[in-house]
Amino acid sequence: MSKFAKLDLGDKIIELPIIEGSENEKGLDISKLRSETGYISYDPGYGNTGSCSSAITYIDGEKGILRYRGIPIEEFNREKPDFLETAYLLIFGKLPNKTELDEYKVLVGNNEHLHEAMKHHFEGFPTTAPPMAMLSSMINTMSCFHPELLERGENEGYCMTASSLLLSKIRTIAAYAYRQSRGMPSIYPIPSLDYAANFLHLMFSLPNKRYEVDPDIEDAMNLIFILHADHEQNCSTSTVRMVGSSQANLFASCSAGVCALWGPLHGGANLAVIKMLEEIHKGDISAEKCIEMAKDKDNPFKLMGFGHRVYKNYDPRARILKKAGDKVLAKLKVKDPLLDIAKKLEEAALKDPYFVERKLFPNVDFYSGIIMRAIGIPTNMFTVLFSIGRLPGWIAQWREQVKTPGVKISRPRQIYTGENKRSYIPMKDRK
Ligand code: SDX
């Protein structure tokens, strides 16, 4: 097959190199398009545009395939899922052996405390402060306390230190944000607890009453973090790469990623799904009526947790979370009407021509909130948990970009549609 595509502009024909990935994905390299033709490409929302090449995560949206460093996502849904093992795989490109994983866990454990001065920042937030606002600002604040990590390190040592520190402290910051909003006293991590168990302890323990972590809930927490760990060039990860491309430090880049994830079309959808299900439950609205509203262009109602820019098949993460939801609710003996409503919505949507034609399926956010709700996570913390899960992906993608030779600052072009040249009008002459 020719390694070039021909672009015929009428007065000129140019050849565009064809690049191919390890899964036979093909792309047109247009990096010389403007210099050779004066034209730029035009692709609002970047639905057809590759911003980079990456070896971290592979998605086949048509087939509903997701792999972390080549390993199918389904294989992480196992006995005792381990978020830090997945984080290590994504960031360093290999499954750690027992020694490597134990050493990494010690590094993460050594970093779980916040500087006492950082803790005082929480006292300055109102109890109504959105936890995502606290999270993004406190991740950036970490750079004030770790100036030694502001350099853009390519070596493994830098990444070991920076990633273990960020992964550990995001969990503490998240829990403190929750406690601040509830007027709960601060509490310290317990070194003997594993990552997810310590998070639940930091969230729910009281000085006089320790939260006992149920092993099945700990497994569910690990699984939720793992399923959110990376997803190639989504909005928030592209934001992390964009900020990192200016050679900004890792804290600033991840803080920007939190802000991008906050939106209801992205990570904020998990919260929007629960709000939608609660309204349906309260209004006793039938699934059929919801589908009709979702199809009505004049109705602002959208089936949150449905549809995806890349998946035109069932999001494999949603399939796993749907099963995990049944298991967790059964274990906790929780009967959540919202889960039944979600299943009825899914059933109705998947046989409706509007959804079938547009290939709209449940995505990762459709069932995740129901599990978090059953565990006792408040809805305004759902996207914070998504951030904790996504952090290793952001770190891995940021590091991959830092290590890419010759990487340039990201700076898209535009098609200008404003006024043509005109003169300044002095105030006295304005109407
Ligand atoms: C995440 O990119 C990632 O990888 C993201 C993510 C990750 O792990 O990082 O997977 C996490 O963000 C998942 C998505 C969470 N968002 C939601 O659940 C919000 C609801 N979904 C939609 O807003 C929408 O599906 C998007 C934003 C997810 C994708 O939007 P696109 O690709 O821009 O598609 P579109 O909005 O142009 O929709 C195409 C058509 C439109 O109809 P027509 O104009 O063709 O008539 O499908 C319709 C849309 O109106 N449509 C929906 C719908 N989603 C799309 N109609 C009703 N309900 C929906 N949910």
Image (cartoon, helix red, strand yellow):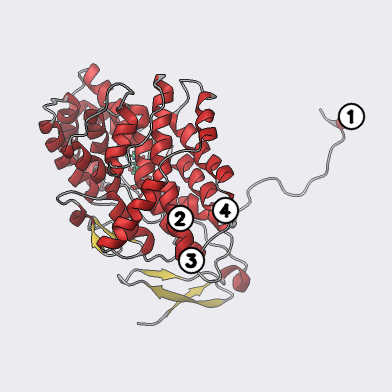
Q: Position of residue 245 (x, y in %)?
A: 56, 58
Q: Report the residue marked by disc 3.
A: 155
| Quarter assignment of residue 413 | bottom right
Do the CB atoms of the residues marked 4 and 1 lie less than 8 Å apart?
A: no
Label 3 vs 1, first from the N-terminus: 3
The amino acid at mark 4 is Glu
Per the image, label 1 sits on a secondary structure element best described as: helix
Q: Report the residue marked by disc 2.
A: 161
Label 4 vs 1, first from the N-terminus: 4
Q: Position of residue 219 (x, y in %)?
A: 20, 43
Label 3 vs 4, first from the N-terminus: 4
Name the residue located 30 percent from the left edge and 70 percent from the top edge: 23
Q: Nearer the viewer, residue 396 or 151?
A: 151
Q: Position of residue 362 (x, y in %)?
A: 24, 42
The amino acid at mark 1 is Lys
Question: How far apart are labels 3 and 1 at the CA level?
Answer: 62 Å
Do the CB atoms of the residues marked 4 and 2 lie less than 8 Å apart?
A: no
Name the residue located 44 percent from the left edge and 70 percent from the top edge: 28
| Quarter assignment of residue 68 | bottom left
Q: Quadrant of the N terminus?
A: bottom left
Question: How far apart are labels 2 and 3 at the CA level?
Answer: 10 Å
Question: How far apart are labels 4 and 2 at the CA level?
Answer: 10 Å
